[in-house]
Amino acid sequence: MKLEDIKYDFPNMPENMRQMIEQEVERQLAKPDISSRNRKTIRHIPKRRLAVAVAAATLALGTTVCAGVLYGLKNNRVGNYAYETKQERQDGVQDGAVASADSEHYVKVQASYLPDGMVQTEEGKYNYRDGRGGVTIGCYYMDTGDTSFEKLSYNVTDKEEVKVNGRDGVYLKTAMDAYNQSLYVTYPEEHLVLEMLVSSDVSKEEAMKIAQGVTVTPTEETAGDDVMLCYNWSRYLEAEKENALAEESGDTMDLSFSAKLLEKAKSVGTDMNMEHNGLTKLPGLTARVTDVQVADNRSILPEGMLDADAATAFDENGDLKSSTLSYVKAGDGVNTVDRVVKTEKSENKLIYVTVEYTNTGKETLTDIMYNGAIRLLETQGDRTKEWRRELEKPAAGDEWDYVVEEGLMLTAEVGAYDVHGGERGNNYIDALKPGETVTIHEAFVVPADRQGEMYLNLDNTGNTKNALENGWMVDIRK
């Protein structure tokens, strides 16, 4: 299960560096994939709410019996749209045993009911075949003790306490997000809290029917169609603490650098030395971007290149969809909710890239991780910065605070590719003999009006400055 799918961020580490480290560790240990997926919604969180960005949902449960101890979850309303929930033991009883703090806890999650047209796309994830949204299931493991569960939720517009197969749970609906419905169910005997995130195009009734058909079973297995790794509550607390520190210090993301660095970008057709582009040395490995094509229809792509997520970027005729931009005025999440002040369409382009990896050395290279990411580099004067929609800021007089973009897919690193290898069949070349070349195709989507700022980053850390300084960035502007 890809844990970032369910909105859990690891602070103070670049996303792409984290992805590289995760992939290397997972390849060696054969773990399930916990890298980030492409999201339908790209959202800028106002800084004053950064500290609670990871606390996007609440839990309101009744009294539960677990290991002979009665637990009650106290749910307090804060203002009009915020809720604080804390799991507490009942008066007169003692806490039960603290859950094991082992690093990994796997469960097998199976859904016996899905609405018509919805299919399982990976472990814990279910989407409609026609490209609409669906349901993503994950879980918390309470490795710090069951009574440490506490969450604060903002922008809640609808809440209902429910029963799911006799278990206490809560249904929540929040403002603005594409996946704006949540369902939480407690499994205290296993020290688990199950989370189900539901897209706006799935009805509440269908969401409840799906939940009633879900079974959760702890397992020793670490891989499989229904096996997922639970998210340790201690990691959630660490992320919350780091976010609070970032809020207190006023740290902001600076993606700018000297424009002179762009002079180091390579041209299409130029060989690049990739020997040190990874956690392990790969003597003799080179890469060359041989072709870059721009299209409006998926017909340019090889059959089977797109997974269920990526396919949602196209309509029934294979044409690339436009994005919907919602300009949002942020509420405080307590007494006021976020509201859309205007919407507009943004046209996109499909970028199809061909990269050749060649072994010019004398030894066979194995388990070669590769990456690709388009960076949109905007130059103003002597400074260049990475342009990202979620970092857009309003001009003087604008009523909005942040932009939500729905429909833009294939934007993440190696979002779609056609060479699969490694333990999990992802972005690895299994083996490359001396003198051998492997050709890789990758696909991305960018805003149509940003084609003149496109650069392809082949650095395995994803760091733009590092890629330019080491000669792993390619100028693909159109």
Image: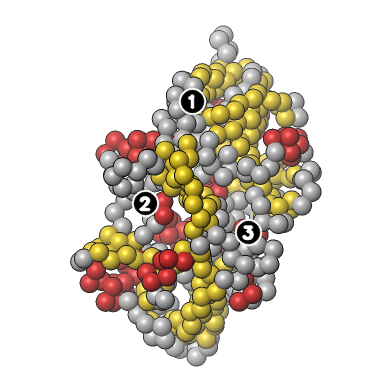
- Looking at the rendered structure, the kind of residue marked 2 is Glu
- Looking at the rendered structure, the kind of residue marked 3 is Thr
- What residue occupies the far left of the structure in this picture? 382
Q: Residues within 10 Å of mark 2 (few under 14, many from 20)?
A: few
- Residue at numbered disc 2: 392
Q: CA distance from mark 3 to mark 2?
A: 25 Å
* SS class, disc 1: strand
* SS class, disc 3: loop
Q: Are marks 3 and 2 in contact (CB under 8 Å)?
A: no
- Residue at numbered disc 3: 312
Q: Position of residue 272 (x, y in %)?
A: 38, 81
Q: Residues within 10 Å of mark 3 (few under 14, many from 20)?
A: many
320, 55: nearer the viewer: 320
Figure check: 183 above or below 202: above
Residue at position x 31%, y 72% from top? 468
Residue at position x 76%, y 30% from top? 165
Q: Residues within 10 Å of mark 1 (few under 14, many from 20)?
A: many
Q: Position of residue 220 (x, y in %)?
A: 67, 47
Q: CA distance from mark 3 to mark 1?
A: 33 Å
